[in-house]
Image (cartoon, helix red, strand yellow):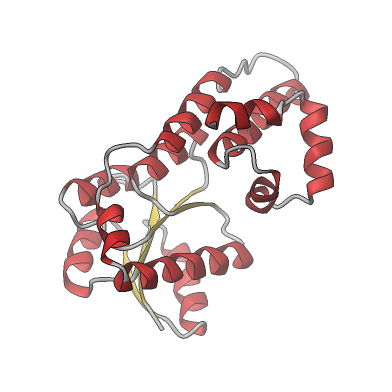
Amino acid sequence: MANILVVDDEHGIRELLSEILNDEGHTVELAENAAQARASRLKERPDLVLLDIWMPDTDGVTLLKEWAASGLLTMPVIMMSGHATIETAVEATRIGALAFLEKPVTLQKLLKAVEQGLTRNSIQKHDPRVQTAASATLAPTPEAALASSAVTANQQFDLDRPLRDARDDFERAYFQFHLTKESGSMTRVADKTGLERTHLYRKLKQLGVDASRSKRQSG
């Protein structure tokens, strides 16, 4: 089992995640701010970190950048937030975060993300090339750059309009982001968004999103 560091300024969330992960057999360290997270990172050397984005002293994205710049981002980091923008999630992924969980975090998504993170960590430990790649953090990959540009182009939301129209704009940006990130693979996008493929096709058609354009951009 793994040693997992949970960083969140909300006591209730720390306790809930700790209880769930302890039940799965993991050892859990808790930090309520960036200062405690820094100390725990150096002392405990966690196998995986669950990191809240919005914290009172130093936000999670800034801490992620700090670890990346100092060569300490050697473990998978899963970001968490209840109100982060798509752009923030893209930035965290570009820096080196493995995944992004929206609060309230569901049990199924939490355990799946943790399992994926620990699997990646195990592979890195046995393959120095993967470890080196994971440590070279601040330069964005072409895929991340494409995803970031897709979000920027689609995230000009006009809030002074009916809710249905504003929601459609957000959903277009959301699906375009995932299509670009996954190079137009409908299978991977369906898995990432939690939709059946038939539902995904129908949703994209309804929103007027061209999946083939994402494939051409990544080609």
Q: Residue 106's spot in the image, x, y percent? A: 61, 62
Q: Is residue 128 above or below residue 83?
A: below
Q: Is residue 167 above or below residue 12?
A: above
Report the number of numbered marks: 0
Q: Quadrant of the C terminus?
A: top right
Q: Residue 37's spot in the image, x, y percent? A: 25, 61
Residue visible at 62% across and 34% down? 174
Residue visible at 60% across and 27% down? 216
Residue visible at 54% across and 39% down? 181
Q: Residue 150's spot in the image, x, y percent? A: 53, 26
Question: Is residue 176 toward the left or the right of residue 66 in the image?
Answer: right
Question: Is residue 47 toward the left or the right of residue 183 in the image?
Answer: left
Question: Is residue 139 toward the left or the right of residue 201 in the image?
Answer: left
Tell me where residue 98 sits by quadrant: bottom left
Residue visible at 18% across and 54% down? 71
Q: Is residue 212 above or below residue 73?
A: above
Question: Is residue 64 toward the left or the right of residue 20 in the image?
Answer: left
Depth check: 150 or 103 in front? Answer: 150
Q: Quadrant of the N terminus?
A: bottom left
Q: Residue 192's spot in the image, x, y percent? A: 63, 50
